[in-house]
Amino acid sequence: MNTKIDDLPLIMDIGMNNGRDSLFYLRKGFRVVAVEANPILVKNAQQQLADYIASGQLIIEPLGLGLEGQCTFYMNLDNDHWSSFHKDWGTRQGTRYQEITVDCVLPQFIFQKYGMPYYLKIDIEGKDIDVVRAIHDFTDRPRYISIEENQTYFFKELASVGCRAFKLVNQRDSWQIKCPQPALEGIYVDAEFDGTTSGPFGQEAPGEWMDLDRALKKYHTEIRTPKGEYLAGNAWFDIHGMID
């Protein structure tokens, strides 16, 4: 790679999980700061992505976000995507779990330490919106943000930090997504996606950009009613926001 590592645009992978999202961003030529509270997943990623860590292209922060100090983390042993600092989330559906103590910081700490990223991916099971709200404390903004859908007010929070266009991406159908060639973000990567990955971002995320009113109309008729009733069956969605 001829470009200096520090000159690569930054992506923050907040909720790294199995590291496949981070690997996708790295292969596309981005610098990545990944945050993950689950120590088992951190150890696995440190081994699997050791070359990127050694080069400085990847930094993994073994932390929880949204709280401060040492906090109880409910590490789900049956589905690591369900692990959470919220007991109801981390222990759902009678699945097995282990309570562990994890060091936590406010999201502002990560932004102060590394700067605001080009793309901010958030998926941390219950603390997602706290990361969005932390952006208010900074002048700089990401170009793109994605967050797992959970409540209607997420759109208002995204709009409050500058998002003016939105996409709703069905994660259940992510296996059908192909990266465009030539690439619209970074360099082209022939990647495959599944239910454990967030998939393409920015201009490569599938679907059309909508203004807030159109996005809310689609959301309330296809995904979740204004009263919170879920309409989309066994599908799940990410909200992608673009800041002008």
Image (cartoon, rainbow, N blue to C red):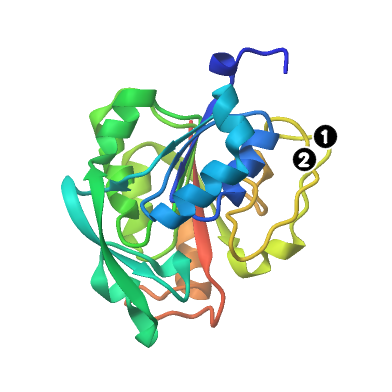
Closest to the observer, 48 or 125: 48
Q: Split into 4 quadrants, where in the image is the N terminus?
A: top right
State the residue at coordinates (57%, 14%).
Answer: 7
> What amino acid is at disc 2?
Val
| Location of residue 181 with respect to 123 vertically, above or below | above
Q: Please tell me which residue is depicted at 49% across the width and 72% down the height of the picture.
A: 223
**Residue 162 location, quadrant:** top left
Q: Is residue 224 visible?
A: yes
Q: Amino acid at mark 1?
A: Pro
Element type at marker 1? loop
Counting from the top left corner in percent of width and height, residue 8 is at 59, 20
Disc 2 residue crowd, few under 14, some 14–19, many 20+, Cα 10 Å = some
Closer to the camera in the image, 213 or 2? 2
Compared to 53, does 149 lie above or below? below
Residue matched to label 1: 182
Return the residue found at the far right: 181
The residue that mark 2 highlights is 189
